[in-house]
Image (cartoon, grey):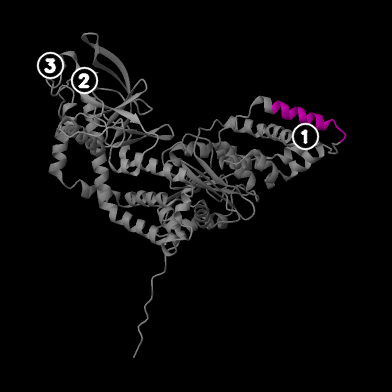
Amino acid sequence: MNDIVTIEPPKTSFSDLVKEAFIDPIRSVLIIDDQYPTWEQIFGEEGYDSGNKRWATKADILKVVRQFRQMSPALAVDIHDGKHNEEIGSYLHQSDLLVLDFQLEEREPYGIRATEIIADLLKNNHFNLVMVHTAIGDLIDPFNMILMSLLTPMGIPEKKVAAGLKLFEEFEDSTNNDFENALEALKNALSATAYVALRAHLNDNGKPFDFLENAPEIAKFRVIAEKAGWDVDARLKVLYWGMAMHDQRVTTYEALPRDLRWSAPGNGKQPWIRTNGGFIAFADKKNTELLDILQAAIEDWRPSPSRLMSSRIRAEISLQGAGAEDSALSDRHAYWQYYQELRGAPLDASPQAAKNHRKTLLEAHAARHTERLLDLIGMKAVAFGLKVLETDPTEADPKAPGFAEYYAIKSTTKEEREKALAHYNAHISTKPVSGWHLHPGHIFKIDQEMWVCLSPSCDLVPMQKATAAVRDSSAAAVKPFVAVRLTPKNEFSRAEVNSNTLIFLKEGGAIKTYSVYPLGGEFGSPVWRLFMASDYGKFEINENRMADLNLSYLFGKGQSMHVEAAKARIVGQLRYEYALNLIQKLGVEFTRIGLDFSAPAD
């Protein structure tokens, strides 16, 4: 009797996930290297065999190019010599991976052109993969230079710098100074590597004192400080003076503020820089297996599960986009009717209203069309998401550290867990301000009061329902609407969250919580008011995704009623289903039945 051997499929590793999400989607490579001839030079009159000694050997070039051509499917490879010309901008925007030579200059100082190219590349909206390829054996100098070109300055106060300089000058003139050149010794002790290490330490909320005591990057500085007899306060002042020299260099790059993470080379560590616009890895030119080095650097970055899944979805859209689009557009009748709606004129016949009406329809169409595309490729995204979850070490051992750690959230603290819940609730319930006129769910601010618009959508269309709430409102060019005042909530219970009466709104970097019920829970009637918005409630969204409104409302004064004008600013927007939930709650408030129970005294 033959035993049947069951062969289990190999288990997926984190390395496999990174390869599938980031490496496999690469379709094109741009090599920028002044030692590589461009296709124009090879096939032009110049030709490769022109005796140009600055070009690398064919064997060395083929080692790099073949790894991309041997991929399945083979990658498209283009080459640019790095010269500063008008064409390079278009080159940078058309490749999935940039292999960039650090030494594009013929002589020192090197790296200036490379930092300019990276700065231009990160201006586009793609997530760019960059491999810096350099003949400089030690990667620390290229790494420091490129990172510093992306940082914004610390902004060290001039008083601290001046105090540090004075202390150094006193040491320089003292008998304790046995250096031949004390300034050079201090510059060497407080190098660019030390500056980068200090920035990393402060980014992790470390204290400067701990850096002074323990950072290996300033071991030489501690020796000088001992000779000088500086105490902790004096050492900090001299440290800031030394760091200010690097900070001035950072200032000259005029980089925009960006989210930056990095791993510096040294002690066997994989060097990389992660920005909100791309990922930069580094390799010595002796190493030609660039895709392997790139993947190892991404693995060391440890992208979160959300980043893995997002990258995989983006790749699937790119891969199947045309087919999925054709399927999504197959219902010709529905899209014909949509185009008729788009061509139709709103009740407000002004040119600006017609344009904004179309912008709103196009915005809604883009959202629905994107949703349909995602529905068509969703199975692949779901399959990859399941693979991520099944690969997580926590799946097999609940006590094992899992992929959740890659989000860099300190989940052991109550404050961080509550912060995560608040950000999640805001993420799922709100959206950026959109539209061109008032909609249910628009959150606006009058002075220090927050309000949310809760009139139905059909009542808010300009020129429509002109007889509702205010007689002949169209004659006054106003749009009446109902809004409920929001009460700030610093503390709330689980029951209140589940009651669907709270609003979580991102204001700046923080999440603020509000309730539509002044007393919390569902106690106390919502404070509602009938407002009138000027110009039928139309607005223009500014670059900060906010919009200004001119409002008015009735208020009592003495024995008469008066109309009060108010300036409002739309600062947020609820997703439609969350706005509809509050409209229903307000409807219950309007239709409540008063019964004759008698409540006990408090």
* Marks 3 & 1, CB-CB < 8 Å contact: no
Q: Is residue 173 magenta?
A: yes
Q: Is residue 361 magenta?
A: no
Q: Range of the magenta residues?
A: 161-175
Q: Which mark is residue 245?
A: none
State the separation of the CA atoms marked 2 and 3: 14 Å
- Residues 292 and 425: in front is 425
Neighbour tally class for label 2: few under 14, some 14-19, many 20 plus, Cα within 10 Å? many
- Residues 433 and 296: in front is 433
Residue 140 relative to residue 178: left or right: left
The picture places residue 179, in percent across and down from the top left corner, at: 83, 38
The residue tagged with tag 2: helix, strand or loop? Answer: helix
Q: Main secondary structure of the magenta part?
A: helix
Q: Type of residue at label 1?
A: Leu
Q: Quadrant of the N terminus?
A: bottom left
Q: Type of residue at label 2?
A: Tyr
- Residues 546 and 317: in front is 546
Q: Which residue is mark 3?
A: 471
The picture places residue 380, in percent across and down from the top left corner, at: 31, 56
* Marks 2 & 3, CB-CB < 8 Å contact: no
